[in-house]
């Protein structure tokens, strides 16, 4: 009798712990807080820098409201990216980044993505950004897109007609203003807009083989605070929802936790056989 109950208890213990691990695997991606690096160097003015600029207060509040921690990033070498899970960059401007992204920074960013980190790259059409089109195109070249030499849409454009994807989930319309559109979108990139020309503003790469997800946009003013000077802002259309989707899409899956759980399953099975 004792032997029988001992066997039952062992089986119950195994399935209880296994069920707990499964719950962790399922629940963690939706609830896990992450560390997101925001570009602290690039912007036309100090007020338009992602990490610290006063015109992006609501942008940062939207990210932290999702439970994530923001870290300003002023240099993009390998050591600067350690500990980050996602990185949001802005096209350099001649006003405050005369060298743009260096070759070693671009290599470090590529390695960050290849290692599982998420990346969001924003082009821009503002004065001073035109000197860095080749620079930002070098950065995004592995991801299949090319940004235009000339900026367009001075008065903004409303974007409709979107491809179904986690980034566009629930989004029916968003708006960009004085953008640098994508003139080429090829694999591994996926064009998330159905219409062409001025509507080529958003592309993604679904990371595979352990690489991180990548999002490429044609503009940064769509994240600005209301009244910050652009025709459209964070509260236009579904801009805010689009930002939330992008943030969540570029957060890496907790693969390490999953592998640990699978390893624990194997260990438990082995112990049952002994």
Image (spheres, rainbow, N blue to C red):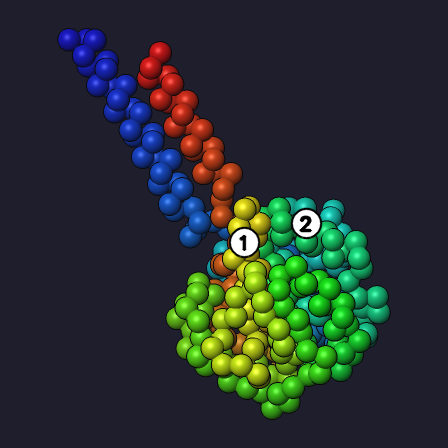
Which comes before the other along the chain, label 1 or label 2?
2
The answer to whether 204 is drawn above or below residue 200 in the figure is above
The residue shown at (68%, 78%) is 148
Label 2: state its secondary structure: helix
Going by the picture, which residue comes out furthest to the bottom? 155
Q: Quadrant of residue 151?
A: bottom right
Residue marked by disc 1:
207
The answer to whether 260 is drawn above or below residue 155 in the figure is above
The residue shown at (53%, 76%) is 234
Residue 248 rendering spot, x and y as whole percentages: 49, 59
Label 1: state its secondary structure: loop
Q: Quadrant of residue 272?
A: top left
CA gap, disc 1 and disc 2: 13 Å
The quarter in which the N terminus is drawn is top left
The answer to whether 147 is drawn above or below residue 248 in the figure is below
Residue marked by disc 2:
111
Residue 152 rendering spot, x and y as whole percentages: 65, 86
Count of all numbered marks drawn on residues in the image: 2
Q: Nearer the viewer, residue 187 or 100?
A: 187
């Amino acid at each position: 009798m004792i032997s029988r109950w001992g066997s039952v208890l062992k089986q119950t213990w195994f399935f209880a712990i296994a069920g707990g691990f499964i719950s962790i695997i399922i629940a963690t991606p939706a609830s896990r807080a992450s560390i997101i690096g925001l570009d602290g160097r690039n912007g036309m003015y100090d007020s338009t820098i992602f990490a610290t600029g006063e015109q992006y207060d609501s942008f940062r509040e939207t990210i932290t409201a999702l439970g994530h921690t923001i870290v300003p990033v002023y240099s993009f070498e390998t050591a600067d990216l350690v500990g980050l899970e996602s990185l949001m960059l802005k096209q350099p401007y001649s006003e405050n980044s005369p060298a743009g992204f260096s070759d070693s920074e671009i290599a470090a960013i590529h390695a960050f993505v290849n290692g599982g980190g998420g990346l969001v790259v924003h082009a821009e059409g503002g004065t001073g950004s035109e000197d860095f089109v080749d620079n930002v195109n070098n950065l995004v070249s592995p991801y299949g897109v090319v940004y235009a030499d000339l900026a367009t849409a001075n008065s903004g454009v409303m974007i409709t007609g979107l491809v179904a994807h986690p980034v566009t989930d629930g989004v029916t319309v968003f708006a960009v203003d004085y953008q640098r559109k994508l003139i080429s979108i090829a694999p591994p990139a996926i064009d998330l807009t159905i219409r062409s020309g001025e509507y080529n503003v958003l592309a993604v790469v679904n990371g595979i083989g352990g690489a991180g997800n990548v999002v490429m946009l044609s503009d940064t003013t769509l994240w600005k605070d209301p009244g910050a000077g652009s025709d459209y802002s964070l509260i236009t259309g579904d801009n805010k929802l689009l930002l939330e989707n992008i943030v969540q899409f570029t957060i890496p899956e907790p693969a390490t936790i999953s592998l640990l759980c699978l390893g624990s399953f194997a260990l438990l099975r082995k112990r049952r056989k002994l």
